Amino acid sequence: MRSKVAIYPGSFDPPTFGHMNIVERGLGIFEKIIIAVAHNTSKRSLFRPEERVALLKKLFKGRKDVEIDTFEGLLVEYARRKKTNAILRGLRTVADYEYELQMSFANKNLDPKLETIFMMTESRFSHISSTIIKEIAYFGGSVKGLVHPLVAKTIQAKLKERA
Ligand code: ADP
């Protein structure tokens, strides 16, 4: 199966400029990218999956080459449902590499046809992670230049709501 569609799965809690950069560069290779927000993550989250989907939909509004979706359960099953065998992931650090290697092996075991394509972060985004964004915002720091202004505003509102 040759695929023109890639799934970009992740937590996106919240989406950052690093994520957005991977999507834009991914579109240099694939005709369409499905950003798939994972439901079953063990990470403690700031936003509910529906909220992350809503945010991503606003960030990519009007884009026919970007679809926003959520999925629960195994990625291989989701990829089958979406009729693609291409998974897109980003790499920043050695820690990312170790985690991604395990994940891609696990997925290959479940479905040998599934291919994970890795894109190296751009150096200007290499320090950006959703976790860091949450930490900075929690302690009152500025996340300008790290996330879209809409995301920054939504984080502020969420932190106020939680306070
Ligand atoms: P997950 O919990 O599945 O790792 P994330 O939302 O943290 O979900 O990340 C989704 C994907 O995006 C991962 O492949 C991650 O390595 C990649 N990614 C996140 N931030 C960046 C960045 N700044 N540059 C490149 N890739 C990134």
Image (tube, rainbow, N blue to C red):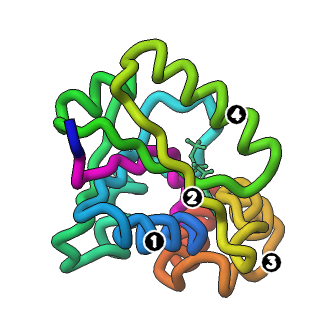
Disc 2 marks which residue? 119
Q: Looking at the image, is mark 3 or mark 4 earlier in the sequence?
A: 4
Amino acid on which disc 1 is placed: Arg
Label 4 CB less than 8 angstroms from ligand 1: yes
Front residue of 23/146: it is: 23
Say which quadrant the N terminus sits in: top left
Amino acid on which disc 2 is placed: Met
**Label 4: few (<14), some or many (≥20) within 10 Å?**
few
* Residue 59 locus on image (x, y percent): 37, 75
The segment highlighted magenta reads 3-15
Q: CA distance from mark 2 to mark 1?
A: 8 Å
Q: Residue furthest top?
A: 109
Disc 3 marks which residue? 141
Location of residue 77 with respect to 148 vertically, above or below: above
Observer-side mark, 1 or 4, equals 1
Disc 4 marks which residue? 99
Do residues under tags 2 and 1 come within 8 Å of each other at their CB atoms? Answer: yes
Label 1 CB less than 8 angstroms from ligand 1: no
**Label 2: few (<14), some or many (≥20) within 10 Å?**
some
The mark found on residue 25 in the picture is 1
In the drawing, does residue 89 fall left or right of residue 77? Answer: right
Q: Looking at the image, is mark 3 or mark 2 earlier in the sequence?
A: 2
